Image (cartoon, rainbow, N blue to C red):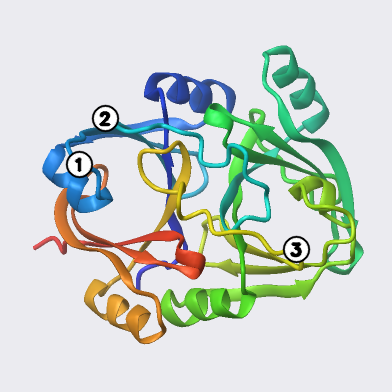
Amino acid sequence: MTDNGIKRICVCSSDLDKSLSFFTNEMGLKNVCSGSFGKKEVKALYGLENSEAKYAMLKNNEQPTLLQLLTFTNAPAKPIREGRPSWDYGYYDVAFRAKDNSAEYDHFTAAGFAFYCPPTRYVADWINLDVLEAVLKGPDQMPMALIERLKEPIPKFPGRFSIFTDCAITVENGDVSDRFYTEVLGMKKIFDQMLPDGLVDDIVGVPHGTHTRMLMYSGGNTPITECLEYSLKGRSMCDVASPGNVGIFAVAYETDDLTQLLRTADKNGFKTAREPVELTMAPYGEVKQATIYGPGNILVEVFQKKERG
């Protein structure tokens, strides 16, 4: 059975070289491979006309999850989260384990970067959590959570950052999201609670008094899929959260049976956005990939590796 956690976080970049430099030099990721897609592949995979793509796959030392950076020709390259509040429905951030957030705040500020939220402490005793969290405005204004654990067990690691801790998604309906991640993708739900009012308001950028439900799903040694449902109602990001515009536009999961997964998704009300395409994608080799409209019409890529004979 294939590990059903996050296998790729798909990020469109306005400048691939600059993003590569940032994520390798600042965040400590390794560039494990690169590749390109021609016009036919880009249209089939992403729905863009007369566009080609280059991509790079990056990873940390501890997880199989890849950060896929892509840049497209003849695409608008508008920041996905620009001018949109955090409670609009769609992918919000990717989170990194940090060693010293106070030092990182000084470092990134001196380098000219801004923060959606400066280092802010929050404590959740009922789950033994005490962290200092900041949200950096990364390349192309992409929100990046930096999470430093203050209470034992405090992880030890070389460098400034280690694992991807989670990928956060703002959702309209937690129950619909739960059906998608458990029944369609087969992930294990590890957390589902209403948070104490005010606990994470400043960090996630919602007005004080907003009620927040947090749901978490795990799948092996991969980042947690974190869903946030707010009492404050937003709008879908599907008008801008698409390939070509810059930022997180999709997350990819692997399956042993793509055909059956698409049937299960359709049965549960999640339609296929892009039909299966067979292609070669580094570092996997030959794959068959499709895209589903997930909760709130977020784009969810699903792929199956070709069996080696």
Q: Nearer the viewer, residue 308 or 293?
A: 293
* Residue 174 picture location, percent across and down: 63, 74
Q: Residue at x 54, y 28 (%)?
A: 139
Q: Amino acid at mark 1?
A: Glu
The C terminus lies in quadrant: bottom left
Residue 7: quadrant of the picture: bottom left
Lower sequence index among marks 3 and 2: 2
* Residue 252 picture location, percent across and down: 39, 57
Q: Residue at x 82, y 54 (%)?
A: 200
Q: Is residue 115 visible?
A: yes
Q: Which mark is residue 22?
A: none
Mark 3 residue element: loop
Q: Nearer the viewer, residue 140 or 128?
A: 140
Q: Residue at x 20, y 34 (%)?
A: 52
Q: Which mark is residue 49?
A: 1
The residue labelled by disc 3 is 232
Q: Tags 3 and 2 in contact by the CB under 8 Å rule?
A: no
Q: Amino acid at mark 2?
A: Asn
Q: Tags 3 and 1 in contact by the CB under 8 Å rule?
A: no
**How many other residues sit within 10 Å of disc 2, few (<14), some (14-19) or many (≥20)?**
few
